[in-house]
Amino acid sequence: MYFGRVKSLFPVILTVLALQGDDPLEARSKGRPDAPVTVYEMADFQCPACRLFTVTVLPTIEREFVQTGKVRWVFINLPLTSIHPNAMAAAEVAMCAGRQGGERFWRTHDALYQHQDDWAKLAQPRDQLIAIAQRAGVDRGKLVACLNGGEARKEVEVDAQRATRSGARATPSFYIEGGLLEGAPYTPDPMRHVLDSIYAVRTRTTPHPPQ
């Protein structure tokens, strides 16, 4: 299933977050800040569909759109805690990793999905999650201090509230230039077609009349 619902939305997430600092999303963003198209991926680290998308589709999208300057990709937390009890703990670890730099956020992001089976069903996942982040290059002492401070949990909760207000009900969901797309493609083609179309519109120039 892919793109089960499309809605026109007011860009709540960017508008509110922009008030908090110069670029509060920088650590969990990829691509040029001024890219013609911005994609907000609203996802849950314990979600199998999110893992599938991250492992099989996102690398192609990143290579073709993010690295070429066409798209800025932003990660927004939407832990569905009613069905994924460890999603919040994983999100906190990722956010704390992000405080050590964007590279560490994305390395931890990727590692959490790649090793999802190792922590998703644990009754107490914290130690395993910390170990995964450590292997991704995160400083353990700073990570633990951040987790104990509680600010990361508040940030995740605010993320989730904003994503929900924007209309997202399932993960992954993608807010792209005025529309909400729900569901994860199994191949890059559906996302590629959407981004190509939106990019063409966003970069279209008005033709000059014939002289």
Image (cartoon, grey):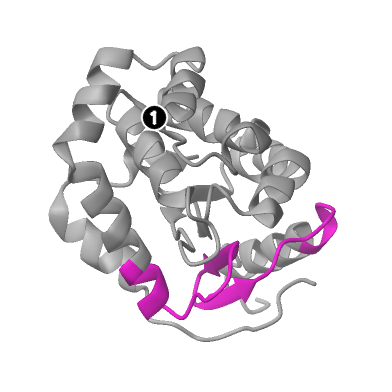
Q: Quadrant of residue 160?
A: bottom left
For image coordinates 22% across by 53% down, the residue present is: 154
- Viewer-side residue, 204 vs 79: 79
For image coordinates 19% across by 33% down, the residue present is: 148
Secondary-structure class at tag 1: helix
**Magenta range:** 161-190
Q: Quadrant of residue 124?
A: top left
Provide residue 64's location: percent of width, then percent of height: 72, 41
For image coordinates 36% across by 79% down, the residue present is: 165
If the image is split into quadrants, where does the N terminus sit?
bottom right
**Residue tagged by mark 1?**
102
- Viewer-side residue, 9 vs 34: 9
Provide residue 69's location: percent of width, then percent of height: 56, 41
For image coordinates 61% across by 35% down, the residue present is: 67
Question: In the rendered picture of this protein, how many numbered marks are placed on residues?
Answer: 1
Q: Is 163 one of the magenta-colored residues?
A: yes
Camera sees residue 33 = no
Give above or below for 84 relative to 129: below
Give above or below for 37 relative to 130: below
Provide residue 54's location: percent of width, then percent of height: 67, 44
Q: In the figure, is residue 191 to the left or right of 147?
A: right
Packing grade of label 1 (10 A; few <14, some 14-19, many >=20) is some
Give above or below for 147 relative to 42: above
Camera sees residue 196 = yes
Q: Quadrant of residue 65?
A: top right
- Viewer-side residue, 156 vs 190: 156
Provide residue 52's location: percent of width, then percent of height: 74, 48
- Viewer-side residue, 93 vs 210: 93
What amino acid does circle 1 point to? Gly
Q: Is 165 one of the magenta-colored residues?
A: yes
Q: In the figure, is residue 111 to the left or right of 87?
A: right
If the image is split into quadrants, where does the C terminus sit?
bottom right
